[in-house]
């Protein structure tokens, strides 16, 4: 038996290393625009010509037509598109939103500038929703995904290993997540200045992101045992983090990686945090519901596990009951 365990341990380590390398490195090497929402505005003839040029990048852009620059700006601020190209008598103007994704803003600038250069025209770039001056490349925001995931895993594991059940476990998870959200907002917003939205909305987002993971950990552990801690930790760390697109954008990752990442807490957390911090809550409903479902299902599983254990304990006769039972 010990030999088998030794062999299993030797084989398992390189397998996990290979899986981690694939999960983190493969999406990064396949980063490219895939149906990236991009607006086009201006006179019909000029806009149509510009659209034909953009469609030469096959599968790269999902073109949205707008009547004028104001409509294009509104679409960017609503997170309907990542940017827009406006054609007017003064030439072409590229509207970007580095707060949504500095990588996408740079990519759009390169693509549109190259196309304009080929036609002998210039392009002026305007950052409609800029990233904060304290974090122009979005590094701090993208780096927040891993600490929040780790905090959630640790909180769920601690609640499980301390033997907390039912309402006590739910209370500990909710209060712990609220404290993490407040501390994280104090650091990221009040101290570092990398978040610039409503403080309470950001704290709530950070708390919900933590609760989604901690509740899932504690909930699965309550139903299947301590193995649930490892299962959720594996899902969040090995898939959730590399698939989150926190440092890029979901539409830059190969499918179905980009979609799967938004179904998991790290990806939904990054998207929601951008919305509440830089876009006044625009397009926040989807990721908020994703995190809420993770939290609700996890807390529900905590209560379910407590009920199942109580029933199992009540079904097992005590020593006194066994002694009083008639001999059969």
Image (cartoon, rainbow, N blue to C red):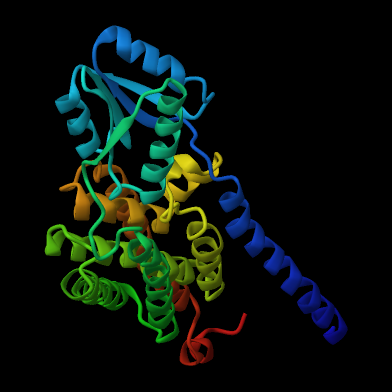
Q: Position of residue 308 (x, y in %)?
A: 43, 68
In the rendered image of this protein, does residue 196 appear above or below residue 83? below
**Front in this rendered view, residue 248 or 156:** 248
**In-image side of 25 versus 306 (left or right):** right
Q: Is residue 98 left or right of residue 154?
A: left
Total numbered badges shown on the rendered structure: 0
- Image coordinates of residue 116 in percent, x first then y, are 40, 26
> Is residue 308 visible in this depiction of the protein?
no
Residue displayed at 31% across by 7% down: 45
Vertical order, 131 against 282 (above or below) = below
Q: Residue at x 20, y 39 (%)?
A: 77
Q: Is residue 242 left or right of residue 98?
A: right
User: Which one is in front, 7 or 136?
Assistant: 136
Q: Can residue 241 be spotted in the picture?
A: yes
Q: Tell me the residue at 20%/55% (across/down).
A: 277
Q: Position of residue 110 (x, y in %)?
A: 43, 38
Q: Nearer the viewer, residue 115 or 299?
A: 115
Q: Quadrant of the C terminus?
A: bottom right
Task: Say which residue appears at 19% left-offset and 76% top-offset.
Answer: 191
Which residue is most to the right?
3
Taking 121 as reference, is 249 above or below it?
below
* Residue 248 rendering spot, x and y as whole percentages: 43, 50
- Image quadrant for the N terminus? bottom right
- From this viewpoint, which residue is outermost toward the top? 45
Q: Quadrant of residue 170?
A: bottom left
Q: Nearer the viewer, residue 256 or 41?
A: 41
């Amino acid at each position: 038996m010990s030999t088998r365990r030794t062999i299993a341990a030797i084989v398992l380590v390189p397998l996990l290393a290979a899986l981690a390398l694939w999960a983190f490195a493969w999406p990064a090497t396949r980063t490219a625009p895939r149906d990236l929402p991009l607006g086009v505005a201006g006179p019909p003839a000029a806009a149509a010509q510009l659209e034909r040029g953009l469609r030469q990048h096959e599968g790269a852009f999902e073109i949205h037509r707008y009547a004028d620059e104001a409509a294009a700006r509104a679409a960017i601020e609503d997170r309907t598109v990542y940017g827009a190209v406006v054609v007017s008598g003064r030439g072409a103007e590229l509207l970007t939103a580095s707060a949504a994704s500095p990588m996408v803003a740079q990519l759009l600038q390169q693509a549109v500038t190259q196309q304009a250069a080929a036609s002998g025209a210039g392009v002026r770039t305007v950052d409609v929703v800029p990233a904060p001056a304290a974090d122009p490349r979005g590094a701090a925001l993208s780096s927040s995904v891993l600490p929040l995931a780790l905090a959630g895993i640790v909180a769920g594991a601690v609640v499980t290993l301390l033997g907390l059940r039912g309402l006590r476990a739910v209370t500990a998870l909710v209060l712990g997540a609220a404290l993490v959200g407040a501390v994280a907002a104090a650091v990221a917003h009040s101290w570092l200045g990398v978040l610039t939205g409503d403080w309470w909305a950001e704290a709530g987002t950070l708390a919900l992101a933590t609760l989604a993971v901690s509740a899932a950990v504690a909930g699965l552990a309550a139903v299947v045992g301590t193995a649930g801690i490892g299962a959720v930790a594996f899902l969040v760390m090995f898939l959730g983090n590399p698939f989150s697109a926190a440092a890029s954008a979901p539409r830059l990752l190969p499918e179905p990686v980009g979609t799967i990442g938004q179904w998991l807490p790290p990806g939904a957390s990054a998207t929601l945090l951008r919305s509440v911090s830089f876009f006044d809550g625009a397009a926040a409903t989807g990721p908020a519901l994703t995190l809420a479902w993770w939290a609700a299902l996890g807390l529900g599983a905590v209560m379910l596990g407590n009920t199942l254990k109580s029933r199992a304990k009540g079904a097992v006769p005590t020593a006194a009951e066994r002694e009083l039972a008639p001999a059969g």
